[in-house]
Image: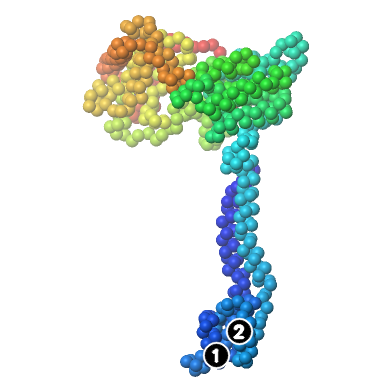
C-alpha cells in the first residue's frame, strides 16, 4: 500500500492547533488557581489603597508571588455588604506589607502552584515544537518523493529521477510482430551476456542503440526485453525529465545516472523520448536552449567517457530521428539504428496472440479476422483493444470474450465512446442522408474501399458514421483511389445539398471537407497528380518548434502558389460534381435506404450492397488481401 506521510501530516497539523487551544483553556494557571475564590470584580490598585486608608478592607490574600491580591472588603454604600475583589499589584511591594501590618488587616500569602506553571510552560512550548517537528518531517519526506517540493532545495544533487528495475521480467516472447527489430537486438543480449566472444576477436561492442518508430509500437517493451533476456538491471529515464527549470540540473542528472549505472554494470540505460534533449543544438525559434544543450553535451561526454566493454549499453527511443543532433548519431554513440514500425497483418496477429494468452476468448473469436480488420493499429492499440473487449465482457457478465465484444471494442478504439441515438427529427433525417450519401458514393465507385456498415449511433464527435473496410496499408495508392476517397468524402455534403437544398446544408461536413482539401493539396504538391506536372513542391510538413528549420521553406513562387490553388480547386470541384451526379441518379434507392437506416439505426455492408444492387450495377471491388 502506498501510504502518504504528507497527507497524514497535513491533516494532523490543523488538528493539533485546535487541540492546543482547547487544552490551553483547560489548563490555564489563572483559572486553575483562583477558581475557588473566584473574584469576579476587579479593583484598581489606587482604589485598594483608598479602601485600606478608610479601613474598609477585612482581609487580603496574596497570590502569584505578590502580583495578585484577592481582597475582602465591605461596601458602605451597600449596607456594609462583604465583597471579594481582585487587585493586580504592581509587583512585590514591601511598603504594602508594612502598611497592611500597620492597619492590622489579616493577610496571607499563597505560594505559586508549580504544577500549573509547568503545565503552562509545556502548553506554550508544545505547539511550536510540534510545528517545527512537522515541518522538518515534511521536508525530509518530500526529498524522497520525486517532484516533491523538497526537490527545489537540493536540485544540484538531483535525487534519482530515473527508475531502476533489477529484473524487468519481460522476455522476447512478450514482444511480437516486430521480428526484424528483435533479431537486430538479439545480438545486444549476447554482448551483455558473453562480451568475451566479441572482445576476443577485437570487436568493439556498440555503446548505443537508437530505436526509431511511432508511439505504441513497443520500443520501451523491447528495451525491457533486452534487459530481461540478458538478466541485467534496467535504468530508465525520459528525455523530458532531464530538462528542468534550473540550469545545470539536467547535466547533473546525466552524471548521476551514469554513475549509478557504472556501479551496477553490466546493465541497460534506457532513454525514452531522447529528442527532448537530443535535438539539434542551436535550433528552433529563439535560438538555442542553454539547459538542453548543457544536458546534451553532458550526455555526449558521458557516452565518450566509458568503453563499450564496461558492459553498459544505452538504448534510446524516439519517433523523430530527423531532429536529433548529428553528434548523437556518429559512430561510438548511437551508431546503431533499429526501426520499429507499426506491424503488418501477420505482426498484428502475433501481437494479438501474445495479449490473448491471459484472456479467455470464446472459440468463435478468430484473431486472424481481427488482425485483418485493424490496419494501422500499433501493439499498444491492439493490447488496448483486447483489454476493452475483456472489460465489456465482464460488464455484460459473460465468461468469455465473444465476437460481439470484440466488434464493439474495435469500434470504440477507432471512433470513441458510443453515445445515445438521436430522437426522430429533421436533423436525424439529415444525418441519415449524409451518411447514406457517403455509403452510396463509396459503393458505386470502383476504386473506393467497400462499405462495412452505416450507423446513426453517435460515437465520439460524430453523430453518424459510415465505416469502410480498410485495405491493408499499401505503400502505393493510385490516383484513381485518391480521387475516389475525395469523392466519397464529399458524398455526405452532396446528399445534404440535393435533398435539403443549398440553404439547409450543415456544419456536419466540416471534417469531411478538411480531409478532402488536405488530400487534394497533397495530390498537387507532393504526388505530381495534377496539370501542374510531376513536381514535388512541398516536403513533408514538420513542426516549426521542434524541427531543425525555422520554417518550412516554400519551394515555389507566388505564381506557382496561385496555380496550386487553382488545381486543388479543380480536383475538388470535379469530385464534387461526380458525387452530386451519383446522388441524383440514385435518389430512389437513397430514400429507401434512409428510411431503413432511421428504422434500424445500423445497416450492414452486405445488406446495403444487396439493396443497391436491386436498382443499379454495383462494381466488384478488388481489395488487396494479404496472406496470413
Ligand atoms: P512505445 O515505447 O513504442 O511507445 P510501449 O513499448 O510503451 O510503446 O508499448 C506499450 C504497450 O503496448 C506495451 O506495454 C505492450 O503491452 C503493448 N505493445 C506494444 N508493442 C507491442 C509488441 N510489439 N508486442 C506486444 N505488445 C506490444
Ligand atoms: Mg515508450
Ligand atoms: Zn461526413
Q: Is residue 126 left or right of residue 192?
A: left
Residue 273 against residue 483 in the figure, above or below = below
Residue 580: x %, y % from top left:
27, 17
Q: Residue at x 61, y 84 (%)?
A: 96
User: Farthest residue toward the top?
Assistant: 533
* Residue 449, horizontal then vertical, whole percent: 41, 15
Which residue is denoted by mark 2 in the rendering?
A: 96
Q: Image quadrant for the C terminus?
A: top right
Residue at horizontal 61 percent and vertical 55 percent from the top: 131
Q: Earlier in the sequence, mark 2 or mark 1?
A: 1
The quadrant in which the N terminus is found is: top right
Expressed as whole percent of the image width and height from the top left, the position of residue 107 reads: 64, 87
- Label 1 belongs to which residue? 53
Q: How many marks are shown on the rendered structure?
A: 2
Numbered disc 2: secondary structure: helix
Question: Quadrant location of residue 564?
Answer: top left
Q: Please identify the quarter of the rendering in which residue 178 is found.
A: top right
Dot 2, how many residues are within 10 Å of its Cα: few (below 14), some (14-19), or many (20+)? few
- Mark 1 crowdedness (10 Å alpha carbons): few <14, some 14-19, many ≥20: few
Q: In terms of secondary structure, where does tag 1 sit?
A: helix
Amino acid at each position: 500500500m502506498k501510504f502518504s506521510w504528507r497527507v497524514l501530516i497535513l491533516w494532523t497539523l490543523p488538528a493539533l492547533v485546535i487541540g492546543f487551544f482547547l487544552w490551553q483553556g483547560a489548563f490555564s494557571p489563572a483559572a486553575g488557581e483562583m477558581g475557588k475564590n473566584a473574584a469576579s470584580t476587579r479593583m484598581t490598585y489606587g482604589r485598594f489603597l483608598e479602601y485600606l486608608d478608610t479601613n474598609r478592607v477585612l482581609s487580603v490574600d496574596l497570590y502569584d508571588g505578590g502580583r495578585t491580591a484577592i481582597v475582602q472588603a465591605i461596601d458602605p454604600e451597600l449596607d456594609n455588604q462583604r465583597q471579594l475583589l481582585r487587585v493586580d499589584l504592581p509587583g512585590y511591594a514591601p511598603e504594602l506589607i508594612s502598611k497592611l501590618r500597620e492597619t492590622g488587616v489579616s493577610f496571607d500569602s499563597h505560594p505559586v502552584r508549580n504544577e500549573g506553571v509547568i503545565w503552562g510552560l509545556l502548553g506554550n512550548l508544545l505547539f511550536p515544537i510540534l510545528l517545527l517537528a512537522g515541518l522538518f518531517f515534511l521536508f525530509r519526506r518530500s526529498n524522497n518523493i520525486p517532484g516533491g517540493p523538497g526537490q527545489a532545495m537540493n536540485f544540484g544533487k538531483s535525487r534519482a529521477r530515473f527508475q531502476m528495475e533489477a529484473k524487468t521480467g519481460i522476455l522476447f516472447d512478450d514482444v511480437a510482430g516486430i521480428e526484424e527489430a528483435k533479431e537486430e537486438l538479439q545480438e545486444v543480449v549476447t554482448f551483455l551476456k558473453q562480451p568475451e566472444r566479441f572482445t576476443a576477436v577485437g570487436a568493439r561492442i556498440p555503446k548505443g542503440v537508437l530505436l526509431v518508430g511511432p508511439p505504441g509500437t513497443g520500443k520501451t517493451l523491447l528495451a525491457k526485453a533486452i534487459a530481461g533476456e540478458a538478466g541485467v538491471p534496467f535504468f530508465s529515464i525520459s528525455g523530458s525529465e532531464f530538462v528542468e527549470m534550473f540550469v545545470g540540473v539536467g547535466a547533473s542528472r546525466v552524471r548521476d545516472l551514469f554513475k549509478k549505472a557504472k556501479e551496477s554494470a553490466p546493465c541497460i540505460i534506457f532513454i525514452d523520448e531522447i529528442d527532448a534533449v537530443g535535438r539539434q543544438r542551436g535550433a528552433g525559434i529563439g535560438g538555442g536552449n542553454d539547459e538542453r544543450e548543457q544536458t546534451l553535451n553532458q550526455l555526449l561526454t558521458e557516452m565518450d567517457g566509458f568503453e563499450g566493454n564496461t558492459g553498459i549499453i544505452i538504448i534510446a527511443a524516439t519517433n523523430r530521428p530527423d531532429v536529433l543532433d548529428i553528434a548523437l548519431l556518429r559512430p561510438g554513440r548511437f551508431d546503431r539504428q533499429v526501426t520499429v514500425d507499426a506491424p503488418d497483418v501477420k505482426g498484428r496477429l502475433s501481437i494479438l496472440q501474445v495479449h490473448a494468452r491471459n484472456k479467455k476468448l470464446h472459440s468463435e473469436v478468430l484473431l486472424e479476422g481481427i488482425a485483418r480488420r485493424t490496419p494501422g493499429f500499433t501493439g499498444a492499440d491492439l493490447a488496448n483493444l483486447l483489454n476493452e473487449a475483456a472489460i465489456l465482457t465482464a460488464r455484460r457478465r459473460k465468461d468469455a470474450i465473444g465476437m460481439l465484444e470484440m466488434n464493439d471494442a474495435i469500434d470504440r478504439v477507432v471512433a470513441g465512446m458510443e453515445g445515445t441515438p438521436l430522437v426522430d427529427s429533421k436533423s436525424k433525417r439529415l444525418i441519415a442522408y449524409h451518411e447514406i450519401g457517403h455509403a452510396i458514393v463509396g459503393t458505386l465507385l470502383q476504386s473506393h474501399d467497400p462499405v462495412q456498415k452505416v450507423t446513426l449511433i453517435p460515437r465520439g464527435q460524430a453523430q453518424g458514421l459510415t465505416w469502410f473496410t480498410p485495405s491493408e496499408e499499401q505503400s502505393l495508392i493510385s490516383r484513381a483511389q485518391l480521387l475516389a476517397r475525395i469523392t466519397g468524402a464529399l458524398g455526405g455534403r452532396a446528399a445534404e445539398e440535393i435533398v435539403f437544398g443549398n440553404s439547409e446544408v450543415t456544419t456536419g461536413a466540416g471534417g469531411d471537407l478538411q480531409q478532402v482539401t488536405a488530400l487534394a493539396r497533397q495530390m498537387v504538391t507532393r504526388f505530381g497528380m495534377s496539370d501542374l506536372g510531376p513536381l514535388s513542391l512541398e516536403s513533408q510538413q514538420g513542426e516549426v518548434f521542434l524541427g531543425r528549420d525555422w520554417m518550412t521553406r516554400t519551394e515555389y513562387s507566388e505564381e506557382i502558389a496561385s496555380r496550386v490553388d487553382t488545381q486543388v480547386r479543380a480536383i475538388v470541384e470535379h469530385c464534387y460534381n461526380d458525387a452530386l451526379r451519383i446522388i441524383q441518379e440514385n435518389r430512389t434507392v437513397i430514400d429507401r435506404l434512409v428510411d431503413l437506416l432511421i428504422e434500424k439505426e445500423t445497416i450492414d455492408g452486405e445488406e446495403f450492397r444487396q439493396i443497391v444492387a436491386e436498382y443499379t450495377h454495383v462494381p466488384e471491388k478488388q481489395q488487396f488481401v494479404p496472406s496470413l
